[in-house]
Amino acid sequence: MIKLSLAMARIGGLVVVFVAVLGGVALVTGAGVIMDSGFRSQPAVRLAGADVVISAPQSIKRNEDLPVALPERATVPATLTHRIATTPGVATATPDLSFPAAKFPPTTPDSNSAPATASDPATAGHGWASVALSGRVIEGRAPRGADEVAVREGTIGQTVRLVAGGVPGTYRVTALVDAPGIYFSDATAAALAGRTTGPRAGTVDLVAVRADPGVGPGELAARIKDRIGAKYQVATGRDRADAESPGAAAGRTLLLLLPSSIGGISLLIVGFVVGGGMSLSINRQRRDLALLRAAGATPRQVRRVVGLQGTIAAGLALLPGAALGYYLAARFGDLLVMIGALRADQPLVYGPLPALGAALLLYGVVRVASWAAALRISQMPVVSGIAGLRPPSPARTKAGLLLIVGSLVLSAAPLLVRTEVAAVGPSLAAILAVIGLALAGPRLVQRAAGAVAASPLVSRLRGPAWLAVHNSHGNALRTAGAVAALGMVVTLGLSVVFTQTTLDRARSDETAQAMSGLVTITAPGLGGIPRDLLADVRTRTRAAGMTMTTVVTEPLQMGDDPMLMARPVMALGPDADGLVDLGLAAGRLRDLRGPAVALDERVGRVGDRLDLMMGDGARVEARVVATYRRSLGFGPIVVSRDLARAHTTSGLDSAILARHADLGPLLARWPGVTVSERADGPQAGEASAQSLINLAVLGVLLAYVLVAVANRLVATTTGRREELDGLRRLGATPRQLRRMLRVEAAMIGAGASAAGIVLAAVPLVLLGIGFLSTPLPTGPYWLIPALVLLVAMIVWLAVELPGRAAFR
């Protein structure tokens, strides 16, 4: 059977399947590496000298779903250290603290000024007791006074100007350590971290434990669990990183969610391309398969012959496709780090499982595509198979038209709901429309070409153009396959890009209206806004502090996850009243004090009570003091600064919103502080990162489709040698035949571009009306001619070059 399959196979069709599977394996392997890293990737462990780390849980378990990661630090009582220290097998139990600490950048170049830390400034400060578990002392003594510090680089006795816990000060270096961060005396660290007064008094971040000689980490962890109960998280090995870094678990959750969000469309496109390749391969050996039926082969045997061909071509593509997939995953990981969606010290994991999983998935896709493509030819009468009578199926055409109509219904979602969830409708509509075009395309092309062929104008065309029109009519399936595949490139390219840019425009318009006349003051290199900076700004202009955090809530609006979900939120105080215009429907921002929140007017009313889980896992009951309309720019909930500050890792403001004023003298006194003329809402950063991810994935997918379609067109043109030779025997010259191929290519390119633009236009027009009150979506309009030219170039090259070779 294998020999027979290879003997009947056409090299052009097998090459199409090979290229399709090659790209498919690469895409699926790359997504698999990202997902595998979500399970196994861990950032570097700072407390590498600890055998066991005890902390509060940094995630919330959900039934039948991934846990919700808590990005803010949850604390444990300092008294827990003594209970752990008395556990049999514990050599030492060390409480650990992390708080914002960074060196002020020099206002003038200073060759003797050394950086104090290379760590994240938001968590770079620690107590001296942690040094023994983080590294070693190179030189000097432990800091004892409130103005003494140990750093990684510098000289003993050097003075450094630091901002620690949001408080600027001058410190003297008493020790050099080979450990990340800045180290203060334990008493100073507790005060700077806010653990001596306030809502976090008497707490520490975690407890790091060393085991007695002969006691293993697993055994010791079990003893500690028995001692302190199941309330706390007891971690060993690589799990210590999650206890150290609350953001690490959030990053891993992102790695798990991304492949699931892009994997479905990737597999859909891969199946579409592989199925097209198999159809082309079968179409080129249609007569041979019909003769095989005539010789007594059963339909099942015919399908088995075709399936073996696809399996062999796919098998050759597995290894190079997997290698390409690992390369794509590495580049995607770099992108995630660049946009801040993944920690730089959280590397991807490159194991064999993604490649194995991709091979199994693609094997299944090839088998299903082979079966579907061979089903009709295997059941077709022998005479029809030899004659090539394969009219498009009416059921297939009706299903395609039904999907196109369904896509129009989904496109209307932005007219009914003005939330980001409504944007899913146009995106899904574009995918359904493309599938509908692929199904109904042959009949539509046949009718369109038939109408053109019956036109009196066609009879006046020259021979090459006349032949091209009638070829398109007679080979509707072949022409429609190319039109649908290339139309998918245009439709998806326009839909994804213009949907993102339209949403960004609507979001930025709301934010700009709410923050008109404001500037944003930030200090990213200092770990947060220093505590005295807001008062300093207020001496020059009106200003309000703003904090970004995360809350976990039940579903608040249509389209939310039906279970608990974490969402980024902005925290404002009473001083934002009159500065930030949320489009209040009821209530006042000046009442944002204590456990208070403002809600989107569609999800709550003033006076309601709302159960929230803050970013550190603390459960609070907040009262609704205001409702607003501009939820697209600010999300469905805004919390009070009082509420957020007690439950953030740093306890510092993220930014200051201020009226325009001359802030030059202020910036000179506060090096490391920056002023931006643009004020963004809580959705901006996440949306921007998501847009970049979507565009990167889209670029890879469309490049894959273009390569596969070009390869298919090349194979199609190469497989027409007999047809072209027959026309030459009838008197056609090579020049006329090349003109015929060019006209066919122009018809394919024009049809694909027109179909792609039309299928994308309806959802995008409705999206623009729903979000911008105009039928014109916002976006780079140069993308439309660019995609048209790209499609034209691909079609021309794929037809022209093999056509010239055929006449050489």
Image (tube, grey):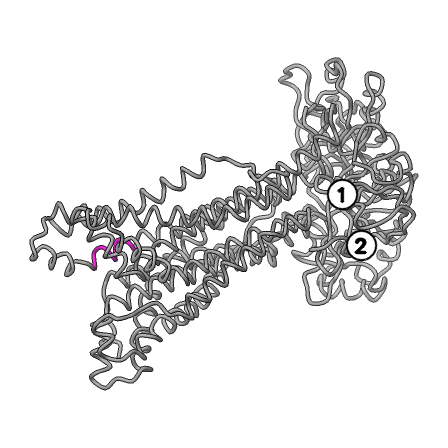
State the residue at coordinates (73%, 51%): 566
Amino acid on which disc 1 is placed: Val
Amino acid on which disc 2 is placed: Ala
Observer able to see residue 319: no
The question of residue 582 being in magenta is answered with: no
- Relative to 599, say whether 657 is above or below: above
Image spot of residue 13 (x, y percent): 27, 63
Q: Nearer the viewer, residue 38 or 203?
A: 38
Quadrant hosting residue 367: bottom left
Q: Nearer the viewer, residue 297 or 783?
A: 783
Image spot of residue 434 (x, y percent): 46, 56
- Relative to 450, say whether 246 is above or below: above
Identify residue for label 1: 569
Give the class, few, some or many, for how many residues have Cα within 10 Å of label 2's Cα (few <14, many ≥20).
many
Segment colored magenta: 712-719
Q: Main secondary structure of the magenta part?
A: helix
Horizontally, residue 293 falls left or right of residue 652, namely: left
Q: Are marks 2 and 1 in contact (CB under 8 Å)?
A: no
